[in-house]
Image (cartoon, coloured by chain):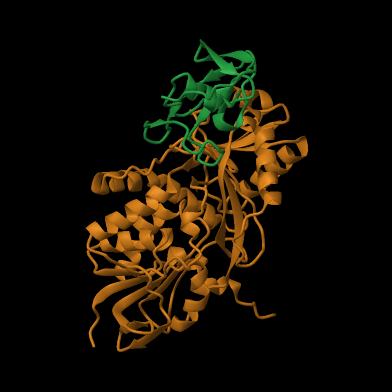
Amino acid sequence: MFRRLPDAAVTLVTIAVDGLAVSARAGETVAAALLAAGFGAFRTTPASGSSRGPYCMMGVCFDCLVAVDGVGSRQACLVQVREGMRIETQRGRRPVGP
Amino acid sequence: MTAEFDVAVIGGGLVGAALAWGIAREHQRVVVLDEGDVAHRASRANFALIWVQSKGLGMPDYAAWTKRSSDAWQGLAQELKQTTGIDVAFSRPGGFTLALSEAELESRARLLQRLHNQPNMVRYPYEMLDRDALLKVLPQIGPEVVGASYCPLDGQCNSLRLLYALHVGMRQLGAEYRANHVVHAIDYHNGVFFLRNSSTAVRAEKVVLAAGIGNARLAPMVGLKAPVRPQRGQVVVTERVEKFLDHPLVTIRQTDEGTVMLGDSQEEVGLDDSVGLGVASAIAGRAVRMFPLLNSLNVVRTWAGLRVMTQDGFPIYDESSSRPGAFLATCHSGVTLAAVHALVVAPMIAAGSLVADLDVFSARRFDVQTAA
């Protein structure tokens, strides 16, 4: 669905999304990496259970929430990928605590 | 002119709606006149506790009244569910007040001891728990928590759904609801009250003032007084998370929908219902010391509500001697007391007078005593 612009000098990092290895470019956000890897819905809502994915990509809509390295409900569009980062998509209410 | 209604209730918040529902249930023709969103709307800002422990120091009748409402709450919730289909999420698992220091714990124990040592104090169980005992029930408490008071009568509900259910229910029972209907004046002629605004007059045989802070303005129109003032309480609410807390605490509870509510400040700031980072931070800071796992949660909203406070903190129930058929009800615990309002006070109003049990709650208690 989304394709990256060609970029001559890229550094690749590997992140884990729900346990699967996903290749990402250093400097891009978690949301960009997940969209490029084909993830459309990042979570389901705690209220109705309907699917949600990035909408604004600039920190406003809070629809791209994922767990980053064990911390739930982080905005994927505001967090940069890092080698070895663990991402979990969320289903409904997140667990409380780390 | 004859009356159009048996009873006009001024105020459509939790107190007014509970009374209107209960009066309509007694087969009276009821109209509810609600001011609109310019009103201060304590019923939309509260913490949704049905709270018993620690209430009534200085007035044991208030402790008994509160316990009576707590005991009647299950019945109210069931009836609302059966008649309206709305589940108000009532639960009564017992509540805690946590202490973050030995001094706080001792002061709490002394307060409850003084409360329960009062003559004519209603009997109900409560206990002081040390940290080890508390850990068995609330294993997530932080290292600074030294103990708690516990009362099995404390409970909670979803107070927005309670307000909604009472409104749906009272209309099912035939009550009429008029939004944006401010009352400017109340006249009384030949046993009929005329509730006037700039364009109309509603005629009713009885009138119930249940307008919260607005009662202070309305009460003199029927020969009563309601010395009430606003007291601000700020609430912080988090995102919805998996259930981790079944018991309500006086300052922390998890709602049926999963959000965690943190409260509640007591600020004397007049009609200012703004929120501020200072108080909200203090509320959140104490909550995180009580439950460190809250630290990672996102706060989604803060708000402030204005409690309707009397100078002694107890409710006022009154009826007018100069204007027979005029009643007044005001309190800061519209959730806790919803059951007695709907099931005890409302039938009295429908029957025409408050029984003597409620005399103790008359605003006459604020009159200056004549020196001997």
Tell whether B345 sits left or right of B250: left
Quadrant (top left, top right, bottom left, bottom right) of the N terminus of chain B:
bottom left
Which quadrant would residue B95 be assigned to in this image? top right
Q: Is residue B101 above or below residue A42?
A: below
User: Most extreme residue toward the right, as rendered?
Assistant: B103
Q: Where residue B364 sits: x, y (%)?
A: 54, 74
Letter of the green chain: A
Front one among A43 and B101: A43
Front one among B372 and A91: A91
Q: Is residue B171 above or below residue B132?
A: below
Which quadrant would residue B145 be assigned to in this image? top right
Q: Where residue B2 sits: x, y (%)?
A: 23, 84
Colour of chain B as rendered? orange
Q: Where residue B343 sits: x, y (%)?
A: 34, 56
Front one among B240 and B233: B240
Q: Where residue B347 sits: x, y (%)?
A: 32, 62
**Residue B106 seen from this side:** yes
Q: Is residue B368 above or below residue B152?
A: below
- The residue at 42%/70% (across/down) is B35
Quadrant (top left, top right, bottom left, bottom right) of the C terminus of chain B:
bottom right
Which quadrant would residue B184 be assigned to in this image? bottom left
Front one among B112 and B12: B12
